[in-house]
Amino acid sequence: MAPTAADADEDDPVVTEYDVFITPEIQEQLYVLQYLNRPPDERLVEETGTKPSSLRIKPQSGFVEVDVPVDIRNNFNRQMGVRWGEALRKTKQIGQKAYGIAAGFERTMPRPPRPAPSTAVDNRPTPTPGPTLDDDNYDDYITNFEDANEKGHVLNTQTYGGQIQPDDGKGPNYMLGSFRNNELHLTKLKGLVQMRTQFHHIDALAQLDAVNRRREKEQQEGAKTVEPKAFMPTVKRAGGDTAAEVTQALMKATNQEKWQRLEYEDDDSGTAYATYADCLFVNNTDVAPKLHAEMSNSEYLNTVSAPSGGKGIKKKLPHKRQELVEISDESDEEDA
């Protein structure tokens, strides 16, 4: 005997019912950061020593980066930590502000030495010294590891980064749900950010190798000082609509855009709880406007359904009455 609709309801009973509310639009930008290669039970909180030490964003290009402290005293390679930390420190000293796609894949190289205003005895200009890149006291940093870590010679953070996927009106609308008793409050998200591990220390090491190769070449061929040059203005054709030109312009704008530093509040802080209660709930539910559907149930089913070969649900045509005509064999023989 086939199960009836009543039996199906008994197998799948209604456990709880919630009143659904949609919160008013907030002025703050609400995003969800999804850490794809980090276990969900490892929270980024101060209690476990993993509270992010830095949070930065490029609003125009949408890049976001978070620096998370790592345990440098357990299962940590001090030699590589010093090497990578020094590569980051030296490249930042040159003027590198970002790495990878967040920098438009651009590398900042040391500028050629400029003539100083004062001259020597032989009336030759004295070049201005640039940033110091010859600090190779790796052995001392490893021996005095704690002191080197405090002075910024050790890579002691792990960087996560991603790009905001904004709501362009073409894809699904994501909303953040918050429960309060028998109420479900939905808040619309501005976008999602899929955070992945960034290897800026590898980029810094490759950049430092390129700087050293250039310095060796300049030592062999001689450093070229910066001198004024004559220029002639030219008019370029209007363009910029091809895929390569659009990508190049995007990378250039991304490199020129500066980071904006944000303050990171811990999950268990009072500020986080106050913001959560103030922004993710409808304060007075008694006066909240009620939602009314603009279509009936059949119209809704007709809209969401997409059968092959047409739009919506097609009405079933009534079956035509079929009449059976019996033809005898005798009549066939007579006709033949």
Image: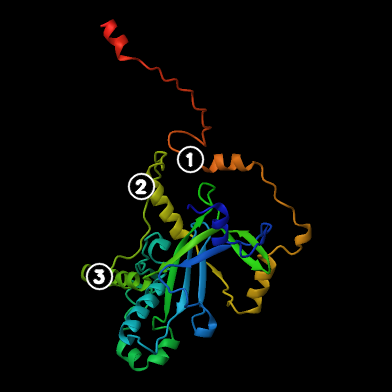
Front residue (pair 263, 169): 169
Q: Amino acid at mark 2?
A: Ala
Other residues around mark 2 within 10 Å, as few (<14) / some (14–19) / many (≥20): few
Distance from the alpha carbon under mark 1 to that under mark 2:
38 Å
The numbered disc on residue 222 is: none
Q: Which mark is residue 306?
A: 1
The residue singled out by tag 2 in the image is: 244
- Quarter of the image holding residue 287? bottom right
Q: Is residue 21 left or right of residue 267?
A: right
Instruction: Name the residue at 44% across, 70% down.
Output: 160
* Count of numbered circles in the view: 3
Q: Which residue is mark 3?
A: 213
Secondary element at image label 2: helix
Which residue is located at x 45 percent, y 58 percent?
254
Mark 3 and mark 2: Cα distance apart in space: 30 Å
Q: Earlier in the sequence, mark 3 or mark 2?
A: 3
80 sits left or right of 195 in the view: left
Instruction: Give the residue type that dot 1 points to.
Output: Ala
